Image (cartoon, rainbow, N blue to C red):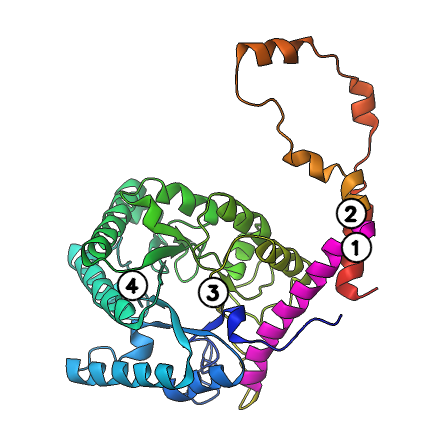
């Protein structure tokens, strides 16, 4: 494999302030390493060839601090972006950490909490616009229940829709060049989350007043937690032109949200995902929402970041080799894969019905054919293993 493995800004790799800089805290233990300052974080990204950085409002500006202090923190961030050439690729709002969000944000039973959540989001949308972030992600981590009787799901979805319509209206009025990307997750921190999967979220988006302004930010770990194929979900999001942003990490099925280094677990699924992205029209960020192992320290956290990008580039190179392999082309032909792109019956017409109903099918022959999937799948494995 002779392809490049060193990232460059043109690859559009991005990391959130909460990722490489995660202090190693978990539900059972406190921090294991010191935080990284925002300036050092951005400079570190530039040094390893990353393109973008994303943030929650509370990552960047101290929650509850005087406006003058928050302004100074924002200006310092803008200065280091200018110095390094790293761009602000995405922004989002922390609507999950503070205790006031314990019953939800946009779907809290308390109307005042819902109003505050929308206000907090509007204020950070202004910051995102100032920084030139083209995408605003919304993860409803607290939008859900433990007690099913505590919320009427229809009322909760009404309030969710109301909030999204309001935010879209604000962006339209301000003429900001921002699109929203909703991030589904089945559970954690809530027992059951509203809009738990890609499919739920795409259906919800179709109910909004401005559906063209809202797409998806799917995450590897979240669909995997639900036992679903992330590859299939992203493929449908692309088909419906709703992939506005993507979170790359890794995850073991049936575990808590692990946010592992991309490519560290589901290597076959990751190969198929990278191949899909590289062969699609998606040109947005490849955003790594992952964290170093809790027992990592010092330069190891930057090795983690390099590993995420290196693995993506390696899988992209493997995917190109796979697609160019004549054995693969033969196996795809044996599987009739190209035939799936051919129209089955075309648009409805009475003439088309007549033609179809007159056809004779050799059912026994159709049942007896094979599709060479074993050969094709083995070629995937061979390519990943370098055989």
Neighbour tally class for label 3: few under 14, some 14-19, many 20 plus, Cα within 10 Å = many
Q: Which residue is mark 4?
A: 102
Q: Which residue is mark 1?
A: 325
Distance CA(mark 3)–CA(mark 4): 31 Å
State if disc 2 and disc 4 touch (CB < 8 Å): no
Which mark is drawn over residue 329? 2
Q: Position of residue 272 (x, y in %)?
A: 65, 55
Instruction: Provide the secondary structure element on which disc 3 rests.
Output: loop
For residue 272, above or below residue 54? above
Distance CA(mark 1)–CA(mark 4): 53 Å
Q: Earlier in the sequence, mark 3 or mark 2?
A: 3
Q: Earlier in the sequence, mark 3 or mark 1?
A: 3
Q: Earlier in the sequence, mark 1 or mark 4?
A: 4
For residue 119, above or below residue 339? below
Q: Position of residue 210 (x, y in %)?
A: 29, 45
Distance CA(mark 1)–CA(mark 2): 7 Å
Q: Position of residue 37 (x, y in %)?
A: 38, 88
Distance CA(mark 3)–CA(mark 1): 28 Å
Q: Earlier in the sequence, mark 3 or mark 4?
A: 4
Residue at figure coordinates x 51%, y 55% from the top left: 282
Q: Earlier in the sequence, mark 4 or mark 2?
A: 4
Instruction: Provide the secondary structure element on which disc 4 rests.
Output: loop
Q: Which residue is mark 3?
A: 285
Distance CA(mark 3)–CA(mark 2): 30 Å
In magenta, the rendered stretch is 300-329
């Amino acid at each position: 494999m002779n392809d490049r493995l060193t990232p460059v800004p043109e690859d559009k790799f991005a990391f959130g302030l909460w990722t490489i800089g995660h202090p190693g805290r978990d539900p059972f233990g406190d921090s294991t390493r010191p935080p990284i300052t925002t300036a050092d974080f951005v400079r570190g990204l530039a040094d390893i060839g990353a393109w973008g950085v994303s943030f929650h409002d509370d990552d960047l500006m101290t929650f509850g601090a005087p406006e003058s202090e928050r302004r100074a923190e924002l200006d310092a961030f803008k200065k280091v972006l200018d110095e390094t050439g790293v761009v602000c690729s995405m922004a989002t709002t922390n609507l999950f950490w503070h205790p006031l969000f314990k019953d939800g944000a946009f779907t809290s039973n308390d109307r005042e909490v819902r109003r505050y959540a929308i206000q907090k989001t509007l204020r950070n949308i202004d910051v995102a616009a100032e920084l030139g972030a083209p995408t605003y992600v919304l993860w409803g981590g607290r939008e859900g229940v433990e007690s099913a009787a505590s919320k009427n799901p229809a009322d909760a979805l009404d309030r969710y829709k109301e909030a999204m319509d309001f935010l879209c209206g604000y962006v339209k009025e301000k003429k900001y060049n921002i699109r929203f990307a909703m991030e589904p997750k089945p559970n954690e921190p809530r027992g059951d989350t509203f809009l738990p999967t890609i499919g739920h979220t795409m259906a919800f988006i179709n109910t909004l007043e401005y559906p063209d302004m809202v797409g998806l930010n799917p995450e590897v770990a979240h669909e995997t937690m639900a036992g679903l194929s992330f590859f299939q979900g992203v493929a449908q999001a692309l088909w419906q032109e709703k992939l506005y942003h993507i979170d790359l990490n890794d995850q073991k099925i049936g575990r808590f949200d692990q946010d592992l280094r991309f490519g560290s677990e589901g290597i076959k699924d990751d190969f198929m995902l990278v191949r899909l992205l590289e062969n699609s029209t998606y040109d947005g960020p490849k955003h790594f929402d992952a964290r170093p192992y809790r027992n990592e320290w010092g330069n190891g956290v930057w090795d983690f970041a390099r590993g995420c990008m290196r693995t993506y580039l390696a899988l992209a190179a493997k995917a190109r080799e796979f697609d160019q392999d004549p054995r693969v082309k033969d196996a795809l032909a044996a599987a009739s894969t190209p035939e799936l792109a051919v129209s089955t019956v075309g648009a409805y017409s009475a003439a088309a019905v007549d033609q179809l109903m007159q056809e004779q099918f050799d059912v026994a022959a159709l049942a007896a054919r094979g599709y060479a999937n074993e050969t094709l799948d083995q070629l995937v494995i061979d390519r990943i293993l370098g055989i």
